[in-house]
Amino acid sequence: MNNPIWRLIEDGPLDGRLNMAIDRAILTACDQGQAPATLRLYGWDKPTLSVGYSQNKLRDVDTVQCGQKNIPIVRRFTGGRALLHQHEFTYSLVAPIPHPSFPGNLAGAFGAVSKAVVFSLEKAGVAKPEICGKDKRSMGQGSKRSPACFSTSNHWEITVKGKKLAGSAQRRLNGAFLQHGSILLDWDPGLAHSLLRYSSESEQAQGLKTLISGTLTLREILLAKPEWGELAHCFADGFQKTFPGLWKQETLSSLETGLVKEYLGESEQVSSVKDLG
């Protein structure tokens, strides 16, 4: 296939449960051979905590604090650890397996997507973003495994000056894979940290210190918080030039919209789907 078909979806800020349902629906449709490779760009309409698909929510998340602060909790269909989505730009990329743009394994696909993210960030004005390699994995000095996503730079994630700027997680099915990526425009580390559980006060204090020392935001790099639309333009351009093909800006199919309704599972959320296409 000389010219792979690509679909671009730009959703902007949406409800967290809806965001997760849409990504899962696209993955399901692609896995069934009913959707093309898709880059989806979106945000979050209110602060929302997501946990990885296999993460122990009761162990890692302070659900009482989330309730008191009116922070919804959603479960991602990808792996990784807890992340507060607040001042954030998010991408999801779904592609069939096999696909000419990606090696047929997790690490190879991660690497290919990370190169597109680096290219996109450079277009946005970020100087020298780097892909974290096997020799650069960082958890912070003397720290235990934290429940926070941004406390660790894993293989293929993006760092600037040794600090994590973009987190990512992937889920692979037999016929397709989904990769989520989060880029911090700005953040409130105190709020993010207060929503997580730790075994002791000293571990909690060390966790916050590690989180702050190892994380960087676009506001800090660019000295201004970029507009979501400007960053979306950079990512759309960066991914299209990294992965050549026939790109079209579209919405969800009727199959995917039906899957979104199924995954949401609650009537009050279904009304939001009618505006998607």
Image (cartoon, rainbow, N blue to C red):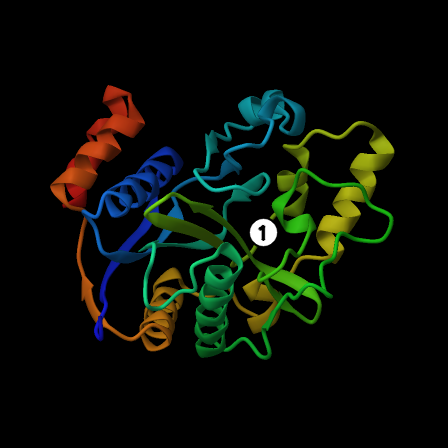
Residue that carries the numbered disc 1 in the rendered image: 187
Residue 264 x, y percent position in the rendering? 30, 27
Viewed as shown, does residue 54 lie left or right of 244? right
Residue 102 x, y percent position in the rendering? 40, 65
Taking 83 as reference, is 220 above or below it? below
Of residue 232 and residue 65, the one placed in the foreground of this image is 232
Residue in the image at 18% along x and 65% along y:
248
Helix, strand or loop at label 1? It is loop
Viewed as shown, does residue 2 lie left or right of 180? left
Taking 247 as reference, is 267 above or below it? above
How many tags in the picture?
1
Corner quadrant of residue 24: top left
Of residue 149 and residue 234, the one placed in the foreground of this image is 149
Taking 259 as reference, is 242 above or below it? below
Taking 192 as reference, is 40 above or below it? below
Residue 89 x, y percent position in the rendering? 44, 56
Residue in the image at 21% along x and 50% along y:
35
- The amino acid pointed to by label 1 is Trp
Residue 181 x, y percent position in the rendering? 47, 54
Residue in the image at 54% along x and 22% along y:
67
Q: Few, some or many C-alpha atoms within 10 Å of disc 1 (few <14, some 14-19, many ≥20)?
A: some
Residue in the image at 51% along x and 31% along y:
71
The N terminus is located in which quarter?
bottom left
